[in-house]
Amino acid sequence: MASFRCFRPDDLDKFSKCNLDPLTETYDLSFYYQYFAKWPSLFRVAEDTNGNIIGYIMGKLESSPEYLKYSEHYLPWHAHITALTVAPEARRLGIGKILTESLEVAAEAGDAWFVDLFVRKSNTRAISFYEGMGYSVYRVVKDYYGDNVSDPTAHGEDAYDMRKPMRRDKTLKHIREDGRSHDVQPEDVF
C-alpha cells in the first residue's frame, strides 16, 4: 500500500530505490531543490508503509521565452514532466498513473495547454504507459540524450516529445497524429 504526498527536502535521502534504474535520470541536489522551490505542487512522492520513497514525479509549468514567440518551436503555457520513476518492486501497481494524474490535475489548475515529457525512444514500456494515458508523440528530438543505453558506442539516443492536451486546448492545436515523422534538433526544444 502506498500513500501520496508532496515532496519534502529530506526525501532526497530516500530516492535511491527509484534512481538506481538506468532509464531514470539522476540530477544534482540543487536541481531537485529548485523544483521544490518553484513548483512544489508538481513534485510529489509515493511512500510505502515503512516510509521508503517508492516513486516520485517532478514537473513544472512554463512557456518558451518571449524571444521565441514567433518561432515554429515556441511552446505556450504548459506543464512538463521532468521525471517520473517508480522503484522496481513497486511497479505495475498503478503508482506511476496516480503520480501522473496528480500532475495533470495541477496542470489543469494552472490553465496549461498540454502536458509534455521527453522519453527515450528505446523505452518502449514507458512509451506504452504514456500512450495508455492519452499521450502521443509530437516530435522526435534527435540525439537528445547524450548516452545510448542500448548501444554505448552510439552517439546519443533520440527522444520522443510526448504530449497530452488539457481542457484549454479544445481544438487539439498542440498535438499531432504523425509526430514520429517530425524530427527536430535538441537546440530546437525549450
Image: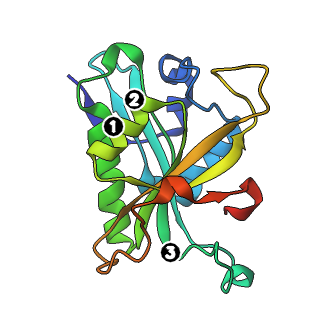
Q: Residue at x 33, y 35 (%)?
A: 96
Q: Residues within 10 Å of mark 3 (few under 14, many from 20)?
A: some
Q: Is residue 67 left or right of residue 105?
A: right
Q: Which residue is mark 1?
A: 129
Q: Earlier in the sequence, mark 2 or mark 3?
A: 3
Q: Residue at x 32, y 70 (%)?
A: 109
Q: Secondary structure at mark 3?
A: loop
Separation of marks 1 and 3 at Cα, in angstroms: 24 Å
Q: Is residue 95 above or below residue 164?
A: above
Q: Disc 3 residue type?
A: Trp
Q: Which residue is mark 2?
A: 125
Q: Residue at x 65, y 22 (%)?
A: 149
Q: Is residue 104 visible?
A: yes
Instruction: Say which mark, if any, is on residue 77.
Output: 3
Q: Disc 1 vs disc 3: Cβ atoms closer than 8 Å?
A: no
Q: Disc 1 residue type?
A: Phe
Q: Disc 2 residue type?
A: Arg
List x then y, in percent, for residue 153.
Answer: 79, 20
